Image (cartoon, rainbow, N blue to C red):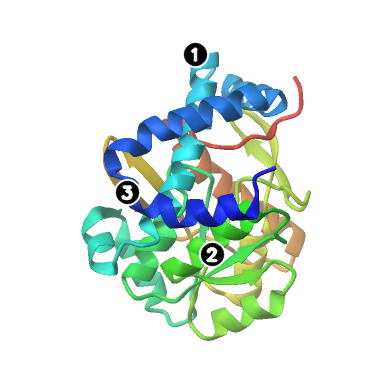
Amino acid sequence: MVSTAAIHAAERVLPQVPSALVTPIAQIMGTVAYAASPGARRAVRANLEVIAPDRASASLVRHIFAEQSRNYLEIFRLSRTDAATLRATIEKRGWEHFTTAHAQGKGVIVASAHLGPISVVGQVLVACGYATVLPVETEHSEVQRAVNRARATIGLEIVRTDTPLAVVRALRDGKVFGLLADRAVTGVGERVPFFGGEALIPSAHVALGLRTGVPVIPAFSLRLGNALVASFEPPLELRSTGDRDADVRAGVAQWAKVLETYVRRYPEQWTVFERVWSAR
């Protein structure tokens, strides 16, 4: 187990790591994690055999572990980057979809995924002056606490997932509520078509959008070569027919189609370490 002192030392050192060293350090960290995590290795390989069967290999699995390590490194490094530099560094695609939704004055629900440098979407929102709330699960390790401290340093407002009133209050205040919606870790979600099969996909963002009337915008963080990209899609077309269960399921199916497009395009950046589909 990593000691608290080591974590605090890492929080001081990581923001100072030169850009040229991030990739080699991530490769070392990823290789260690890959070797130490046989269950996660099997899960990543199983997911790859569904989303990119022609590319599923041990080397790509190892790359995904390194990608996750790089993502963590960049959370700490970018947490000390000023807003002007972030605005100049991160390329925004489809930005008009977000600004148009935000102009409605209801707040915005931004649904993202464990894709690419995960924090980039939240960082660019805060850097552009939008108050953004991020729900986090109960912290069980010093590493999780350190990551959440880095997120707070960026300017993200952290709320616990077991405090739903804080989320509703944030939306009433016109804030942005961001959440990751590709892993149903709590078992709450809808089984919808995903890569030709059925997968349990989270539903909280859709249910909240239907309940509040707040637009739900899919947005994804990407690493394209040396460029960091925040890609925003048009809002989901959520409809209230009076059948709440059917409406949520239809909305989740919409979201799954958008998610599938990005995961199919960038399978090497999808850092999910649990099996998404049951064994076939």
In the picture, which quadrant includes the C terminus?
top right
Pick the residue in front: 76 or 221. Answer: 76
Pick the residue in front: 97 or 84. Answer: 84
Give amino acid for label 3: Val
The CA distance from mark 1 to mark 2 is 39 Å
Instruction: Tell me which residue sits at (38%, 70%) in the image.
Output: 126
Instruction: Give whichever of discs 1 and 2 has the lower sequence position.
Output: 1
Instruction: Give whichever of discs 3 and 2 has the lower sequence position.
Output: 2
Q: Indicate the secondary structure of the residue bearing disc 1.
A: loop
Using the image, determine if residue 149 lies above or below residue 15.
below
Instruction: Give whichever of discs 3 and 1 has the lower sequence position.
Output: 1
Give amino acid for label 2: Arg
Q: Identify the residue under disc 2.
A: 149
Give residue 186's position: percent from left, percent from top. 77, 52
Q: Identify the residue under disc 3.
A: 229
Quadrant of the rendered image containing residue 130: bottom left
The CA distance from mark 3 to mark 1 is 26 Å
Q: Is residue 235 visible?
A: yes
Give residue 78's position: percent from left, percent from top. 36, 56
Q: Is residue 251 visible?
A: no
Q: Identify the residue under disc 1.
A: 54
Instruction: Tell me which residue sits at (53%, 45%) in the image.
Output: 114
Give residue 178's position: percent from left, percent from top. 53, 64
| Left or right: residue 274 compared with residue 133 | right
Q: Dot 3, how many residues are within 10 Å of its Cα: few (below 14), some (14-19), or many (20+)?
A: many
Give amino acid for label 1: Asp
The CA distance from mark 3 to mark 2 is 23 Å
Q: Residue furthest left?
A: 88
Query: Mark 1 and 2 residues: CB-CB less than 8 Å, in contact?
Result: no
Quadrant of the rendered image containing residue 41: top right
